[in-house]
Image (cartoon, rainbow, N blue to C red):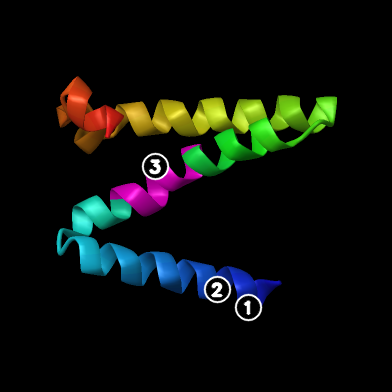
Amino acid sequence: MAQGIHAWWQWVTQALKVSTDDLELQNWVLMYLLPWTYWQQQTDKTRHPQLKSDYQKAAERAYEQLLKHPITQQMDSQKSQE
């Protein structure tokens, strides 16, 4: 399982490098945008009530961190929707 996670992480990192040279933007995607997206998707996928609640809390914490980040705050509404 760890090898799969490592491979996914490398794929994401490489895809970001192709998309942008901006290291700050790459880190924002990896450390703020992806965690929120991940927990939101996990919340939507599970049918287990306790897991759904835990995942929702994790998504909310990740979203709070995402909103506090300077890159997020600098985006206009159109850019943040994209």
Quarter of the picture containing the C terminus is top left
- Name the residue at 34% across, 49% down: 29
Where residue 43 appears, as percent x and y from the top left, is 66, 32
Neighbour class for label 3 at 10 Å: few (<14), some, many (≥20)? some
For the residues labelled 2 and 3, say whether their Cβ atoms are less than 8 Å apart: no
- Check disc 3 and report the residue beneath it: 33
Element at badge 3?
helix
| Magenta part of the chain | 28-36
Residue type for callout 2: His
Neighbour class for label 1 at 10 Å: few (<14), some, many (≥20)? few
- Check disc 2 and report the residue beneath it: 6
Residue type for callout 1: Gln
For the residues labelled 2 and 1, say whether their Cβ atoms are less than 8 Å apart: yes
- Name the residue at 72% across, 30% down: 54
Toward the viewer: 14 or 28?
14
Q: CA distance from mark 2 to mark 1?
A: 5 Å
Horizontal side of residue 23 vs 59, given as left or right: left
